[in-house]
């Protein structure tokens, strides 16, 4: 089986950067996967896509060699097993609030005797290489999302879950939950209590030998997160990057043409 490059990078003590796909299109996936990310995750939970788009997006990403991952909609065995069979090397599961849920999530990712995953890796048999059944348990990453006040109360027990590889922080929902809706959900939190919460998650991960991942809005904030001890950061995503680049291009055009128009008018007045 092709080895999980993320594990190799972390073993060398280096952090990784994860790309994010919420547009259901193989061409978009192919473009993003070619930009130098260590991994790229397809968002089946909130993305404008479903399983019928996920599989061809994984196919489009294959040429780049990037590690393919997916965030599933919920803690439900059917979709978790299907994204794995489609070739995911990592699964991010939202709203994991208890150690029981974390253990249940892990069980859906692992073949017996480590779990209860059903065998039938339709595409993974080809995309992941030979000996998949024997090696998948060791290569597939399981990330539980900590994004609620309840999950924070159970943080230590979740982080201690056998077979769980890491905790992926959803800062928008975590902020919303911890502050009971008083703060709008958003990335890159600057509130002291939120930074403390993020550092508490990192500490729990380090204590129990788990990887810590954080979804960020900017590269600057992601770099700070790495300094706090996070092993992986997601920086923005396809839809936001597209909007940002388009907005910057239009703004630049407006500014340049406005300046030229002013210059022309000034020339006319001088004449």
Image (spheres, rainbow, N blue to C red):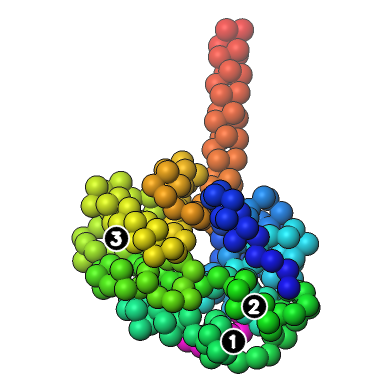
At x 45%, y 47%, the residue is 226
Label 1 element class: loop
Q: 132 and 167: which one is in front?
A: 132
Direction top: furthest residue: 270
Count of numbered marks = 3
> What secondary structure is the magenta-colored segment mainly?
helix
Query: Would you place residue 251 above or below residue 126 in this image?
Result: above
Question: Are the residues flagged by discs 1 and 2 in contact, CB closer than 8 Å?
Answer: yes
The spot of residue 128 in percent (x, y) is 73, 73
Residue 1: image quadrant is bottom right
The spot of residue 28 in percent (x, y) is 68, 61
Q: 162 and 31: which one is in front?
A: 162
Q: Is residue 271 magenta?
A: no
Residue that numbered label 2 is attached to: 136
Residue 130: image quadrant is bottom right
| Label 2 crowd bin: few (<14), some (14–19), many (20+), radius 10 Å | many
Whole-angstrom CA distance, mark 1 to mark 3, is 35 Å
Which comes sooner in the sequence, label 1 or label 3?
A: 1
At x 48%, y 80%, the residue is 106
Which comes sooner in the sequence, label 1 or label 2?
A: 1
Q: Which residues are magenta?
A: 76-83
At x 26%, y 48%, the residue is 191
Whole-angstrom CA distance, mark 3 to mark 2, is 34 Å
Label 2 element class: helix
Residue 175 marker: 3
Residue 111 marker: 1
Foreground mark, 3 or 2, reads 2
Query: In the displayed structure, does residue 149 sit left or right of residue 142?
Result: left
- Does any portion of residue 17 appear in the rendered image? no
């Amino acid at each position: 089986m092709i080895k999980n490059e993320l594990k190799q990078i972390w073993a060398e003590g280096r952090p990784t950067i994860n790309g994010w796909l919420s547009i259901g299109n193989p061409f978009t996936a192919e473009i993003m996967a070619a930009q130098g990310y260590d991994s790229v995750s397809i968002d089946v939970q909130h993305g404008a896509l479903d399983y019928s788009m996920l599989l061809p997006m994984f196919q489009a990403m294959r040429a780049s060699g990037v590690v393919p991952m997916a965030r599933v909609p919920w803690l439900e065995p059917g979709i978790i097993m299907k994204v794995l069979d489609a070739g995911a090397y990592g699964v991010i599961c939202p709203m994991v609030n208890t150690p029981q849920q974390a253990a249940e999530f892990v069980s859906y990712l692992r073949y017996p005797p480590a779990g209860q995953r059903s065998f039938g890796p339709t595409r993974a048999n080809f995309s992941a290489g030979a000996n998949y059944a024997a090696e998948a348990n060791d290569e597939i990453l399981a990330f539980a999302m900590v994004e609620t006040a309840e999950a924070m109360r159970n943080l230590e027990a979740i982080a201690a879950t056998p077979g769980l590889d890491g905790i992926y922080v959803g800062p928008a929902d975590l902020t919303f939950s911890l502050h009971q809706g008083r703060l709008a959900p958003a990335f890159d939190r600057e509130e002291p209590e939120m930074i403390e919460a993020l550092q508490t998650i990192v500490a729990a991960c380090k204590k129990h030998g788990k990887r810590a991942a954080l979804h960020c809005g900017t590269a600057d904030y992601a770099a700070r997160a790495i300094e706090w001890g996070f092993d992986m950061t997601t920086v923005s995503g396809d839809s936001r990057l597209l909007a940002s680049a388009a907005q910057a291009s239009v703004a630049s055009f407006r500014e340049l043409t406005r300046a030229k128009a002013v210059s022309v008018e000034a020339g006319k007045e001088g004449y």
